[in-house]
């Protein structure tokens, strides 16, 4: 990873804290699967949101530009993810919207 890659915090509010926690848990399952580069079948992560996780079978070095996996956490009804990336946050923002985020905000480290 290029040391110049910025740290971006993604903030995505959901309808309530329960949905936010379910989304964060699903994202963390998926993040672990990507980071560990597991060749096994994609995990069941997004199906409860009406999405097929296999459609998001992203690979390290191909589909994502991070080396250290992000971690989703919640603050009330909001999911927050800190990620060191140049552009993967844009794809992740789209996924968050499909998971039901009411909006998605990406803040660069200088804006935090």
Image: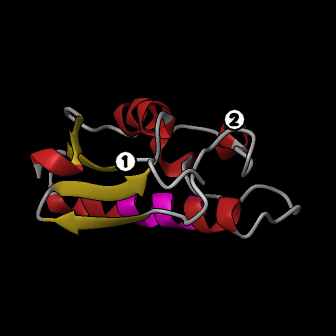
- For the residues marked 2 and 1, what is the alpha-carbon distance in whole angstroms? 27 Å
Q: Nearer the viewer, mark 2 or mark 1?
A: 1
Place residue 64 in its image quadrant. top right
Query: Which residue, given by chain and number where applicable, does mark 2 sit on?
Result: 55
Secondary structure under badge 2?
helix
Q: Main secondary structure of the magenta part?
A: helix
Residue 6 numbered mark, or none: 1
Q: Is residue 60 left or right of residue 23?
A: right
Q: Residue at x 15, y 48 (%)?
A: 110
Question: Which portion, as a residue range, is magenta?
Answer: 23-30
Determine if the magenta segment contains residue 29. yes
Q: Nearer the viewer, residue 24 or 111?
A: 111
- Dot 2, crowdedness within 10 Å: few (<14), some or many (≥20)? few
Name which quarter of the figure residue 42 lies in.
Answer: bottom right
Question: Label 1 near label 2: C-beta < 8 Å?
Answer: no
Residue 4 position in % (x across, y down): 44, 48
12 or 45: nearer the eye? 12
Residue closest to the far right: 39
């Amino acid at each position: 990873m290029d040391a110049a890659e910025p740290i971006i915090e993604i903030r995505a509010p959901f309808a309530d804290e329960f949905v936010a926690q379910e989304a964060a848990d699903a994202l963390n399952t998926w993040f672990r699967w990507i980071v560990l580069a597991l060749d096994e079948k994609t995990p069941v992560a997004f199906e409860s949101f009406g999405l097929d996780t296999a459609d998001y079978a992203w690979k390290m070095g191909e589909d994502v530009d991070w080396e250290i996996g992000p971690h989703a956490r919640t603050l009330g009804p909001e999911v927050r993810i800190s990620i060191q990336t140049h552009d993967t946050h844009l794809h992740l923002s789209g996924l968050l919207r499909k998971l039901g985020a009411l909006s998605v905000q990406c803040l660069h480290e200088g804006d935090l």
